Image: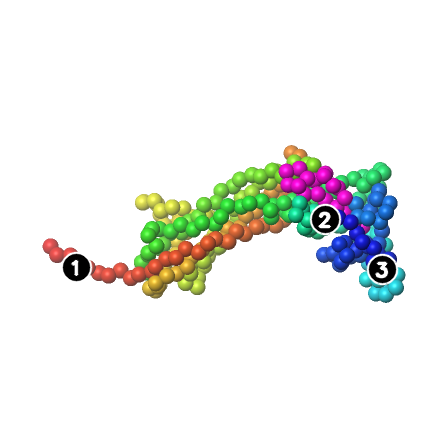
Amino acid sequence: MSASAEGGCNTVNGSIDAFDTIVCAEAPGSGNGEAGSAQGAGSGDTGVTFSYVPYCERGDGITGGDFYGCGGQSACGEDGQAFVVYAVYPDGTTNSLGVQCIEPSAVPEAAAPPQVTPGMVAAAFRRVPLPESTLTLAPPGGRTLVGLDTVLWTQAERFSEVVTLLGQRVELDISPSSYSWSHGDGTGQETSSPGMAYAEGRPFADYVTHAYTRVSDAVSLSVDTTWSARFRVGGGPWQEVGETVTIEGDPVSLEVVEAEPNLVGY
């Protein structure tokens, strides 16, 4: 990814980026006004590379040399400069991951690849394939009774994933954190439990249940599972990923009927 000159300033892909900034200085070590790039450094297992462009110091003007308020590259830290980091995916799409401060001591001559940030890890977490949210019911057969506690459950288990970012091993410890149940009759509930299959003798307080109050030919139930994660880089300390990912479940149809009393002779 490179920057293109326009009106005395460079813009990312010819437009203002997500931070509404304008690039008005060269990337460290580039010497030609183009955005710096950690090409190949972050490819690893995912094929993702990272580029960075100088972060604009905002001014007050909106015309002339202060077009869009850009007054030069923004300073940061003790004697550093700020850069906007972009993930560049194999299909050519890009994603802004935030602003990073690079100190001169970290870049002796040419620009060093940016460090793995929580934003980069969150972007990688969003791309991890997560299990489907599948709803199972008891009683089975797609039919329940008015007033009966219908048992609901889904399958969701903790698992791990390893990705490579900037040439470094990043471990993701991924687990389900909450479940959103839609009963199909205008009601729902949120739980931290995935529920469990019915077993004779187990107290109903252990289950996720719902009792319907009226007859219906077909109600549509579903469950959405929200996943959270923590990560560590190169065997370092664990940190929380600041975002969650919710997987929506496919609907399941259920008929609600009323019990009919039958006389039994002796």
Q: Reply above or below: 80 against 146.
A: above
Residue at the right extreme of this rendering = 65
Distance from the alpha carbon under mark 1 to that under mark 3: 90 Å
Q: Nearer the viewer, residue 16 or 157?
A: 16
Instruction: Classify residue 8 as left or right of residue 160.
Output: right
Say few, some or many: other residues with alpha carbon within 10 Å of mark 1 (under 14 / 14 to 19 / 20 or more): few
| Start-end of magenta stretch | 37-54
Instruction: Classify residue 201 as left or right of residue 240.
Output: left
Residue type for callout 2: Tyr
Q: Residue at x 63, y 45 (%)?
A: 124
Q: Position of residue 64 (x, y in %)?
A: 88, 64
Q: Which residue is mark 2?
A: 86
Instruction: Classify residue 139 as left or right of residue 238.
Output: left
Distance from the alpha carbon under mark 1 to that under mark 2: 74 Å
Instruction: Classify residue 21 as left or right of residue 48.
Output: right
Residue type for callout 1: Leu
- For residue 236, which quarter of the picture? top right
> Which label was assigned to residue 144?
none
Q: Which residue is mark 1?
A: 263
Are discs 3 and 2 less than 8 Å apart at CB? no
If the image is split into quadrants, where does the C terminus sit?
Answer: bottom left
Are discs 1 and 3 less than 8 Å apart at CB? no
Q: Nearer the viewer, residue 63 or 226?
A: 63
Q: Nearer the viewer, residue 37 or 115?
A: 37
Say few, some or many: other residues with alpha carbon within 10 Å of mark 3 (under 14 / 14 to 19 / 20 or more): few
Q: Which residue is mark 3?
A: 7
Residue type for callout 3: Gly
Q: Position of residue 110 (x, y in %)?
A: 83, 39
